[in-house]
Amino acid sequence: MKSTLWISMVAAVALGACSGKEKVAVTPFEPTLNRSNYKAWYEYSRPDRNEYAWTLWEWSPQLAPAARMASAEGKPVLIWLENGHPLGATTTNGIARRDWWTDVSLNSALNKVAFAADDLQWLLDSEDAEGQLIDKLLQQDDDRDDLLEHGGVLMAASSGKWLGSYSGLDAAELKLMMEQALGTWDELASDDRRLAEMSTMVSEDRPANLFPDDGLTLEVHRRPMLAAMDPTGERTKPWTHDYLWLSKSEVAPLMLTKLGQELEVPASQAQRIGLFLLVDNLYSNGESFDLEDLQLTKLTFQCISKIGSTVRFTMSGEFKAENDDRGMHCFVEGDGSLNLDKEYILSINMGVQAQSWGHSVEMPEDGTAPLMSMGLHRVNSYEGSHRITPSQFDQYPANWRVTD
């Protein structure tokens, strides 16, 4: 990759009295990401075992199957709700609450429940059985407004009996709520614990077959960083992750066939990957850019070996987007492999360095410009994605969803 200039937030110039906002100017930085160190940046961005411990609990990414399971097993259901799917951790509170599920003092209570994680806004907008259940529960909740504003945890019987809720961030208070809710559960009659009709509780408009098992699912992890950070040092917090789905037909043009071949990723795929990377959910509100905001989307694959039908390749790229309010710029180095016979990408591992700027961007405490590192890789349906389908996310525009 060519030496490319970094960007950082500096002084602003007025756009004019009618705009009411100032134009953010930027000063160049040199990226430290390169071909020799990208694997270190990739590994740095990924969560360690403790940070991923919350995945050890059997979260259902939809309320309906969790309610059915709870009813069948005679358990209350613990519902983790955020504005944005909590397994994707697209909210600040959702990121913070991940640490709850590694607190061993909660284990006694957690072993007595069925687990659900779902997008609160999606459920509120739904008119199916899931939506009716969450509406019934919220009507019984005196802290409904706090839960709607901040997200949190709700305990309930599958029948629709509210047991308790908590919208704060203190694990000790969560434990107290769960213990009280379990006490209420123990006093319920059998009919008040279970679904009246199991078959009526289904997730509509969110079919699991939207997950492109024959295509490509990418997961990105993001972390804050300092300009002079050592990627072998202690990981910074918070960290976030999101998913992008590419169908088999979208992956087909990425097949390298000859040793030494260089392939520039087609504009449509490069734009989707660029928009996926150009999201700041560390320092800003995580809003994605529009297609017209893209100023640069370049991603190049180069074949470095071919043995039979297996091809290994390197990746280099640069993406940038900007509008009147904010901007983001990132640089990419990575590698991957594919199988020509199956037209299937076997692996992708990217190290990414990026910077975000704008009027709503929160500056780091040390006063430096807000930089971040990212690690992007291929995931399978049984990995950390928990089979979250594209239709379960409202983080990105609808036309990002798999259409095949």
Image (cartoon, rainbow, N blue to C red):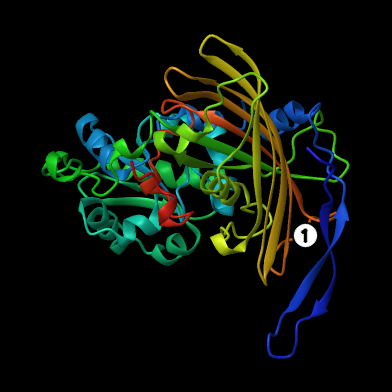
Seen from the viewer's position, the closer of residues 366 and 99 is: 366
Seen from the viewer's position, the closer of residues 285 and 308 is: 308
- Residue wearing tag 1: 363
Q: Is residue 314 left or right of residue 70?
A: right
Q: Residue at x 34, y 61 (%)?
A: 141
Q: Where 303 falls versus 269 (above or below)?
A: above
Residue type at tag 1: Met
Q: Where 345 falls versus 128 (above or below)?
A: above
Q: Position of residue 20 (x, y in %)?
A: 70, 85
Q: Residue at x 54, y 14 (%)?
A: 310
User: Quadrant location of the C terminus?
Assistant: top left
Q: Is residue 188 left or right of residue 335?
A: left
Seen from the viewer's position, the closer of residues 198 and 305 is: 305
Res. 220 image quadrant? top right
Q: Is residue 178 left or right of residue 366?
A: left
Res 186 seen here:
no
Res. 157 image quadrant? top left
Q: Where 247 falls versus 399 (above or below)?
A: above
Query: SS at mark 1?
Result: loop
Q: Residue at x 39, y 59 (%)?
A: 121
Q: Residue at x 56, y 50 (%)?
A: 271
Q: Position of residue 19 (x, y in %)?
A: 68, 85
Seen from the viewer's position, the closer of residues 320 and 236 is: 320
